[in-house]
Image (tube, rainbow, N blue to C red):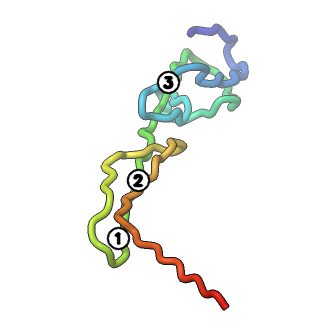
């Protein structure tokens, strides 16, 4: 989107709006000449034509490990989760014997 400004006027940097980049998050707008990164709402004085490039970073991913804590076996979860993503906890159950002792007096 192009907007015209008078020389030496202040420009307020716009938000990213509804732009998305799969598996990435928006960092800011990078000046194509100075490489300075601006955040939405920042202002700068314009002296010449400028192009602000959307700058993205890859979302960090996390893994979930299951430790048998002295036991053997257990579930494997080979999924790479991103920040804010819901994790389904895997339960590995084996036959468990529960005994009740009733004492009558």
Quadrant of the drawing holding the C terminus: bottom right
Q: Position of residue 32 (x, y in %)?
A: 47, 26
Q: Position of residue 103 (x, y in %)?
A: 60, 87
Q: Which labelled disc corresponds to residue 101?
A: none
Quadrant of the drawing holding the N terminus: top right
Q: CA distance from mark 3 to mark 1?
A: 40 Å
Task: Please name the residue that numbered disc 2 is placed on.
Answer: 90
Task: Say whether disc 3 or disc 2 marks the residue closer to the N-terminus.
Answer: 3
Question: How busy is the neighbourhood of tag 3: few (under 14 within 10 Å), some, or many (20 plus)?
Answer: few
> Relative to the observer, which residue lies in front, 103 or 42?
103
> Relative to the observer, which residue lies in front, 87 or 18?
87
Q: Is residue 77 above or below residue 105?
A: above
Q: Is residue 105 above or below residue 102?
A: below
Q: Position of residue 50 (x, y in %)?
A: 54, 19
Q: Which labelled disc corresponds to residue 20?
A: 3
Q: Is residue 59 left or right of residue 43?
A: left
Q: Is residue 84 above or below residue 52?
A: below
* Mark in front: 3 vs 2: 2
Q: CA distance from mark 3 to mark 2?
A: 31 Å
Residue 15 falls in image quadrant:
top right
Name the secondary structure under disc 2. loop
Q: Does the residue at mark 3 contact the one at mark 2 (Cβ under 8 Å)?
A: no
Name the secondary structure under disc 1. loop
Q: Is residue 93 left or right of residue 1?
A: left
Task: Please name the residue that numbered disc 1 is placed on.
Answer: 68
The residue sitting at 37% across, 46% down in the picture is 80
Residue 16 falls in image quadrant:
top right
Name the secondary structure under disc 3. loop
């Amino acid at each position: 989107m192009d907007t015209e400004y008078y020389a030496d006027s202040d420009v307020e940097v716009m938000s990213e709006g509804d732009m998305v980049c799969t598996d990435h998050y928006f960092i800011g707008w990078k000046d194509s000449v100075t490489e300075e990164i601006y955040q939405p709402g920042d202002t700068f004085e314009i002296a010449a034509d400028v192009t602000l490039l959307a700058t993205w970073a890859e979302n960090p991913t996390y893994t979930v490990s299951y430790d048998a804590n002295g036991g053997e076996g257990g579930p494997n979860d080979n999924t790479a989760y991103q920040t804010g993503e819901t994790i389904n906890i895997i339960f590995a159950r084996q036959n468990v014997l529960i005994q009740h002792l009733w004492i009558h007096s």
